[in-house]
Amino acid sequence: MMRINVTRSALPPMEEYINEIAPLWDSRWLTNMGEKHKTLEKMLQEYFNAPNVTLFANGHLALEAVLTSLGLTGEVITTPFTFASTTNAIVRCGLKPVFCDVDPEYYTMDPKKIEALITPETSAIVPVHVYGTICDVEAIEAIAQKHGLKVVYDAAHAFGVRKNGVSAACFGDASIFSFHATKVFHTIEGGCVVYSNEKLRQTLNQIKDFGLAHAEIVIPGGNAKMSEFHAAMGICNLRRIGDYIQQRRQVTERYRANLAGVRGMHLMKEQDGVEPNYAYFPVIFDGAKLTRDEAADRLASHDIFARKYFYPLTNHCPAYGFRGDETPIAKNVSERILCLPLYPELAMEDVDKICEIVCG
Ligand SMILES: *Cc1c(COP(=O)(O)O)cnc(C)c1O
């Protein structure tokens, strides 16, 4: 059997990509917001049914750019149950992350615990739609309104997810997506900001292009532009996103059929009114035959690599002097959770074999 990783990047047929990039040999316009960049931005706007989309070189820089463009200061309430990028972006923007615990069912920020963390220094809430699960956006919106806070969602996992027909891109003041090769939709490396206030566009575009406006430096920007080759990959993948999500759904249903009801294994609940993207398949090991770590080791001995995603928590970070004791539920989840391999081309026999191994 071949090595199986937790994910495997989807790719369009090679000819399709070659056709997409062929015009670049004539135009010689390889980056700096060319035709492919413009086309992808427009396609995404339609896909999200959102008014404003700005592309970036990756999701992390998209998040840093939007935090900067909103002029945030002081403290930001966020979740530790996420990828390093969320917390790093907050710290790198000179803001202080204040960690809120998560909901025990869905692992997203628990809105009941937000208000106790608000101080006069708080300027924003940065929740994460972890595994593509939509946060309690209504409760978060109400708290933000009441206290005059901005809301920026890290929607890196939530591409294609809709709640009551509304795209995950359309909540809060802004959302960021990652288009990294490992994500449901990718541009190899890439990302974007989706936002409600059109006035952010100019600042976001300046931040990703050295802070320049007509050759003059107006803001200390960096370089976070998406190249034409990356945008072209996005154009090809966006055409096929429906198929990718459908294939992921079949894999997910096989996992659910095999693992539902197994003692000591908790599968993530499906959300009412939410159209999922089947991005991840997390399993909580709590009193099962194997512990999480034993299950991961046994898989590895068969050349199958699941991921302890998210372990450790980002507030359990010695480099930042964080200890992680303030979020006991997140800590408990992170010690028991394992994301099983999931990607469009994963064979059903392999899903069955993975299930057999983790059941011990
Ligand atoms: C992937 C990811 C990011 C970072 O995106 P990049 O495109 O890799 O920079 C940020 N947040 C979360 C939750 C992610 O999973």
Image: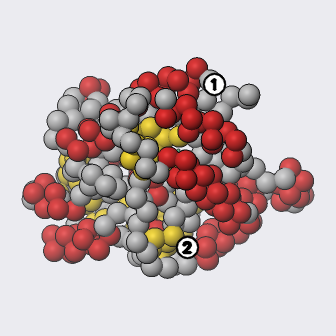
Q: Is residue 326 visible to us here? A: yes
Q: Looking at the picture, which amino acid does disc 2 mark?
A: Phe
Q: Is residue 227 visible to us here? A: no
Q: Residue at x 44, y 38 (%)?
A: 338
Q: Secondary structure at mark 2?
A: helix
The percent position of residue 19, horizontal first and vertical second, equals 88, 58
- Please state, as top left, top right, bottom left or bottom right, where the N terminus lies in the image: top right
Q: Secondary structure at mark 1?
A: loop
Q: In this figure, which residue is indicated by the disc labeled 1?
A: 303
Disc 2 CB within 8 Å of nearest ligand 1 atom: no
Q: Is 123 left or right of 346, judged from the image as shown?
A: left
The percent position of residue 187, horizontal first and vertical second, equals 66, 52
The percent position of residue 48, horizontal first and vertical second, equals 55, 73
Q: Nearer the viewer, mark 1 or mark 2?
A: 1
Q: Looking at the picture, which amino acid does disc 1 mark?
A: Asp
Q: Residue at x 26, y 38 (%)?
A: 331
Q: Is 82 left or right of 254, judged from the image as shown?
A: left
Q: In this figure, which residue is indicated by the disc labeled 2?
A: 48
Image quadrant of residue 152? bottom left
Work out whether residue 103 or residue 289 is closer to the camera in this orientation and state it. 289
Q: Residue at x 86, y 57 (%)?
A: 16
Q: Residue at x 41, y 29 (%)?
A: 290
- Tell me which label, 1 or 2, sits earlier in the chain: 2
